[in-house]
Amino acid sequence: MLYPELFKQLEAVRWDMDRDIPWHQHDASGLSDEQAQTIKMNAITEWSALPATEMFLRDNRDDSDFSAFMSIWFFEEQKHALVLMEYLRRFRPDLVPTEQELHAIRFEFDPAPALETLMLHFCGEIRLNHWYRRAAEWHTEPVIKHIYTTLSQDEARHGGAYLKYMRRAMARSGAEAQAAFAKVGVLMASVRRTAQALHPTNLHVNKTLFPRDTIQSRLPNPEWLAHWLDTQINFDAVWENKVIDRILHNLSLLMGQSFQTVQELNRYRKGLTATLVSGALPEAV
């Protein structure tokens, strides 16, 4: 089981909201109304760990190890929402999300293949790590800069935990897991071909609720994410390439291949798909 060791590792570096956030360093002159509004949107977005955890537990009923790990991931992601709301409560109480605004993003996700969902959230953690690093640079108020840096480090650790479960899946399922990871990897690293940067919170996840079946579509300002990325934190091609490089680097290590470009990964994916269709499955790695 991976859960016991992951619990120890993440428990050892867990931060405390009272002791480790330098609330006393707050500088009101460093926080604009524009910046404060983005903190509210991120707080609500982080709350979406609730429906995501419900999805994970439902779709991984046969995997108690991974389901147990969800207790850590859920706690830490909800803590992200909480620390952002605490910041607003202390310094911009008029912008604290209401319970109704938080509950609006809790809805059921359609069932999806567990391996593909695992890879999707692994990529999501990489992307969010980079988004929050950039947000920490954009903000000018010391306390929120510290908070975003802290959250970005958590997201990196979560990505590392997901990677361990991906490695375990490959040992158990071989080409099936490789094909699932390569498929989603191509999707998540092909941002130049999509209208927006792909992340679990802006993907459609419930056909019956379309088009209001993404987390972002249910925020008080559904257009916020694109504006935050493109205009405010300026998540440009340089930063996007960092995300793509991390996805390709980790898949290279995971699969024992060298993927320098998305095109190389896609060719590998096609080969895996052909192998699966032909029935000539390689042994698990």
Image (cartoon, helix red, strand yellow):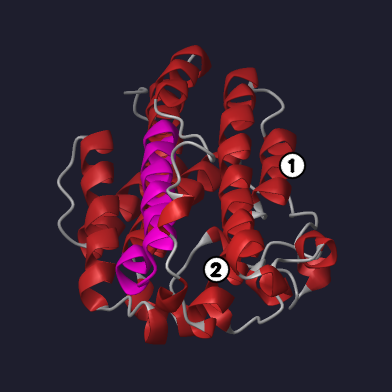
Left-right relation of 46 to 157: right
Does residue 280 appear in the picture of this structure?
no
Q: Which residue is mark 1?
A: 54
Examine the structure image and report whether residue 161 is included in the region drawn in magenta. Answer: yes
Left-right relation of 107 to 52: right
Q: Position of residue 265 (x, y in %)?
A: 26, 55
The quarter in which the C terminus is drawn is: top left
Distance from Cα at disc 1 to Cα at disc 2: 25 Å
Q: Position of residue 272 (x, y in %)?
A: 35, 45
Q: Position of residue 105 (x, y in %)?
A: 75, 62
Residues tagged 1 and 2 counted as in contact (Cβ below 8 A):
no
Amino acid under disc 2: Ile
Examine the structure image and report whether residue 32 is included in the region drawn in magenta. Answer: no
Of residues 265 and 159, the one nearer the viewer is 159
Q: Main secondary structure of the magenta part?
A: helix
Of residues 238 and 56, the one nearer the viewer is 238
Q: Pick whichever of labels 1 and 2 is earlier in the sequence.
A: 2
Which quadrant of the view contains residue 193? bottom left
Query: Label for residue 39?
Result: 2
Residue at position x 18%, y 41% from top?
A: 257
Crowd around label 1: few <14 · some 14–19 · many ≥20 (10 Å) = some
Say how many tags the image has: 2
Element under disc 2: helix
In magenta, the rendered stretch is 134-162
Residue at position x 71%, y 74% from top?
A: 94
